[in-house]
Image: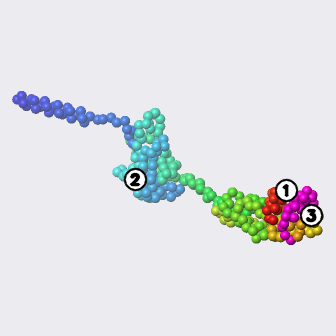
């Protein structure tokens, strides 16, 4: 009898424990709401595979992918619905909660108020799809345009001319033709015109975007030097080696010590009576004692 009483007491205890485990547990998660209906984009039924999303405060709270053209969820009692599950933070302040809908990322014209536990019929339409702003295609860089300047552009032979490229910073190669058969691949070359003439100058430039050439006829005009016999001499000075400089001061057909002496004694006279170019042997732009030394070295 005692054993039966103990067994019955144990049974009552177990039932009490089980009853406590089965007691309902209250949750803080709000009840979801559900939606079904039609879906269209720009008046056309949304194709199968369209993604319908529901957001609250910009955060996604529901998603469904369509399987039927123009329909995002079934009106059948047991059919699949778009379930919108808010979080506690969405309804914490007690205000009305607005649900916004998107079809394939485009905002639908319709919205809904969150009503916990309800099933609502809501047809969704997208009447405006933003047109993306096209990315402008950058214009190809302009091809080069050959251009240059020179100074001096005229004078007596032999004439030294400085050339400056004005074609732009993107140039990678230069080819100058000075009109007397001479060439240069420098950017800003200096060229000596030894003899009289009108010279056409060509500049060809290259860059990553193309080539360009400019030709200037008569760009450089060189006049023949004005000569006269040096004091005490009967003959004009000569240029025995044909380099454009007149080293034969006494005009006897050769360069000798007498030329050095006459040149030395006539420096002042030369500066006052002749163009200095043919006697500027060192090319410094004037006639001076260095030119006497240069002439002496040629003897």
Tell me: residue 48, above or below residue 217: above
Question: SS class of the residue under badge 2?
Answer: loop
**Which residue is disc 3 drawn over?**
230
How many numbered badges does the structure rendering display?
Answer: 3
Image vertical order of residue 132 relative to residue 99, above or below: below
Q: Which residues are magenta?
A: 253-278
Give the quarter of the image for residue 163.
bottom right
Rendered location of residue 189, percent (x, y): 74, 61
Residue placed most toward the observer, 169 or 54:
169
Residue 202 relative to residue 67: left or right: right
Q: Is residue 173 visible?
A: yes
Identity of the residue drawn at 16% across and 31% down: 12
Disc 3 is placed on an element classified as loop
Locate residue 1 relative to residue 78 in the image: left or right.
left
Name which of mark 3 and mark 2 comes first in the sequence: 2
Q: CA distance from mark 1 to mark 3?
A: 16 Å
- Left or right, residue 123 beside residue 153: left
* Residue linked to disc 2: 74
Which-is-in-front pick, marks 1 and 2?
A: 1
Identified at 80% across, 64% down, the residue is 298
Alpha carbon separation for disc pair 3 and 2: 118 Å
Residue nearest the viewer, comparing 141 with 112? 141
Q: Is residue 193 rendered magenta in the image? A: no
- Tag 1 residue: 288
Q: Position of residue 295 (x, y in %)?
A: 82, 62
Q: The C terminus appears in which quarter of the rendering?
A: bottom right
The reply to whether the magenta stretch includes residue 273 is yes
In percent of the image, x 13 and y 30: which residue is there? 9
Q: Which mark is in front, 3 or 2?
A: 3
């Amino acid at each position: 009898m005692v054993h039966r009483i103990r067994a019955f007491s144990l049974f009552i205890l177990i039932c009490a424990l089980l009853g406590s485990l089965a007691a309902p547990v209250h949750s803080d998660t709000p009840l979801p709401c559900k939606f079904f209906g039609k879906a269209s984009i720009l008046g056309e039924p949304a194709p199968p595979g369209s993604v319908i999303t529901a957001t609250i405060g910009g955060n996604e709270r529901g998603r469904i992918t369509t399987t039927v053209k123009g329909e995002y969820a079934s009106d059948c009692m047991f059919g699949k619905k778009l379930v919108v599950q808010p979080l506690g933070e969405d309804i914490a302040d007690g205000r009305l909660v607005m649900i916004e809908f998107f079809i394939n990322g485009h905002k639908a014209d319709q919205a809904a108020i969150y009503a916990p536990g309800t099933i609502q019929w809501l047809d969704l339409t997208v009447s405006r799809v933003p047109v993306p702003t096209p990315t402008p295609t950058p214009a190809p860089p302009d091809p080069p345009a050959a251009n240059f300047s020179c100074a001096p552009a005229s004078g007596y032979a032999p004439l030294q001319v400085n050339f400056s490229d004005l074609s732009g910073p993107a140039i990678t190669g230069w080819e100058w033709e000075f009109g007397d058969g001479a060439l240069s691949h420098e950017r800003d070359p200096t060229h000596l015109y030894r003899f009289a003439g009108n010279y056409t100058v060509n500049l060809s430039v290259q860059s990553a975007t193309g080539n360009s050439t400019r030709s200037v006829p008569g760009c450089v005009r060189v006049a023949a030097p004005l000569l006269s016999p040096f004091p005490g001499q009967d003959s004009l000075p000569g240029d025995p080696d044909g380099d454009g400089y007149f080293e034969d001061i006494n005009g006897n057909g050769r360069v000798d010590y007498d030329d050095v002496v006459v040149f030395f004694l006539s420096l002042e006279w030369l500066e006052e009576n002749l163009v200095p170019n043919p006697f500027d042997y060192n090319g410094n732009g004037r006639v001076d004692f260095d030119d006497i030394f240069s002439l002496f070295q040629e003897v």
